[in-house]
Image (spheres, grey):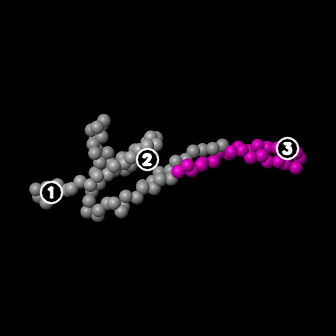
Amino acid sequence: MGDEGTHDEKQSTRENYVDGTVKVVYRTVKVNDFKIVLDLTPYIATSGTLKTLLNPETGKQPTLREVMEGHVNDWNYFKELHMEKVERIPRLND
């Protein structure tokens, strides 16, 4: 899972011709500001399951991808993502 931050910049160059004329050429260039790659594979047991908490505003349980995308896209510079290991509660038919 990853995300990139980019912005567009306008750049100009001058083309000088032998007849003395000058032409200014403008172009838009995409600039990469950052790239975030988040790999949780080493922290996930093969027999475990990752679950998210209910969203108190909507009452729905977001997917893990929705939580991670929300975290990456949040403009708050001081943010944290917490994961907690919870022991599995056995069901009656297990």
Q: Amino acid at mark 2?
A: Val
Residue 14: image location, x then y, percent: 77, 46
For the residues marked 1 and 2, what is the alpha-carbon distance in whole angstroms?
34 Å
* Front in this rendered view, residue 33 or 65: 33
Q: Give the number of the disc on residue 72.
A: 2
| Residue 73 left/right relative to 19 | left
For the N terminus, which image quadrant? Answer: bottom left
Amino acid type assigned to the residue bearing label 3 in the image: Thr
Q: Residue at the spot x=57%, y=45% of the render? A: 7
Q: At x 55% / y 49%, what residue is drawn?
A: 33
Q: Which residue is mark 1?
A: 90
Q: Quadrant of residue 38?
A: bottom left
Magenta stretch in the rendered image: 11-34
How many C-alpha atoms fall within 10 Å of the one at disc 1: few (<14), some, or many (≥20)?
Answer: few
From the top left corner, tell me how far across and down residue 75 is, in percent: 46, 41
Question: Which secondary structure, mark 3?
Answer: loop
Corner quadrant of residue 49: bottom left
Residue at image location 20% in from the left, 56% down from the top: 88
| Element under disc 1 | loop
Locate the C terminus and report the quarter of the image it occupies. Answer: bottom left
Q: Residue furthest left?
A: 92
87 left or right, relative to 73: left
Q: Is residue 87 magenta?
A: no
Residues at marks 1 and 2 touching, judged by CB atoms closer than 8 Å: no
Is 18 in the magenta? yes
> For mark 3, what is the residue?
21
Instruction: State the residue at coordinates (37%, 58%).
Output: 40
Give the overall secondary structure of the magenta segment: strand
Considering every residue shown, the one lying at the far right of the view is 19
Local secondary structure at mark 2: helix
